[in-house]
Amino acid sequence: MTPYDKSNEAQPACPPDGNLLIDTLELDEFERGLLTVARHFFTSFETPAMQSWGHAFAVADERWGEALGLAVAYRLQKVIRAVLDARDHSICFHDPMTPASRDFATGDEVNLLFMLHHMRRDETGEARAAVMALCLDMMDPHVIRAGLAFADRFSCGAKVRTHTSSPPDLRVVV
């Protein structure tokens, strides 16, 4: 199975040019925001002298604020490191500094985003299919562990606090 295999339900069929329009993917705003950060990390690992990891953290900080953004970038970097190790550092991605690529994603980028999308929603079957597509028919435990750690920290299923009519139970201790 290739990352673009039409039989894999984890992602739509990739067009002949290898690009998918990001707006056609069923991703939430948070997941779309991960793409640019991920591209900077891919660039950093491919060409360490560029130190593109700094751009990744800066983009995350600008997008989500310092507290959340830096945590997102840190956890995403771990996922990307695991993916690159599983794939022998070969992954197809767009240059994050090229404006023409902002609306498109490669099959590998889509598989990464779909893996995180399904893990964040605890959709096990779909997450497995995305891991298989991303890791070229392997269920790499390091990718799974890193992806689940990311999904746990930035879950879509966070419990919503219900409002109670009673005041909070706070006391001053002297």
Image (cartoon, helix red, strand yellow):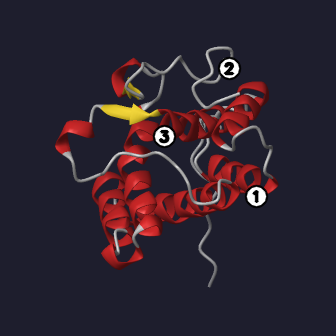
Give residue 142's mark: 1
- Graded by Cα atoms within 10 Å as few (under 14), some (14 to 19) or many (20 or more), the crowding at tag 2 reads some
> Which residue is outermost to the bottom?
174
What residue is disc 3 on? 109
Looking at the image, residue 154 lies above or below residue 13: below
State if disc 2 and disc 1 touch (CB < 8 Å).
no
Q: CA distance from mark 2 to mark 3?
A: 15 Å
Quarter of the figure that contains the N terminus = top right
Image location of residue 14, percent across then percent down:
48, 21
Disc sitting over residue 8 in the figure: 2
Question: Where residue 74 appears, x then y in whole percent?
Answer: 52, 66
The reply to whether the C-beta atoms of the residues labelled 2 and 3 are less than 8 Å apart is no
Amino acid type at mark 2 = Asn
Left or right relative to 162: residue 107: left
The secondary structure type at the circle numbered 3 is: helix
Q: Amino acid at mark 3?
A: Glu
Q: Residue at x 62, y 85 (%)?
A: 174
Q: Earlier in the sequence, mark 2 or mark 3?
A: 2
Other residues around mark 1 within 10 Å, as few (<14) / some (14–19) / many (≥20): some
The CA span between labels 1 and 3 is: 18 Å
Query: Observer-nearest residue: 169 or 159?
Result: 159
Residue at 56% x, 41% y: name it.
112
Specify few, some or many for label 3: CA neighbours under 10 Å numbering under 14, 14-19, or 20 or more: many
Answer yes or no: is residue 158 visible: no
Q: Quadrant of residue 165?
A: top right
Where does residue 75 sit, x and y in percent of width and height? 57, 61
Helix, strand or loop at label 2? It is loop
Identify which amino acid the numbered label 1 is placed on: His
Q: Earlier in the sequence, mark 1 or mark 3?
A: 3
Can residue 59 be seen at all in this image of the molecule? yes
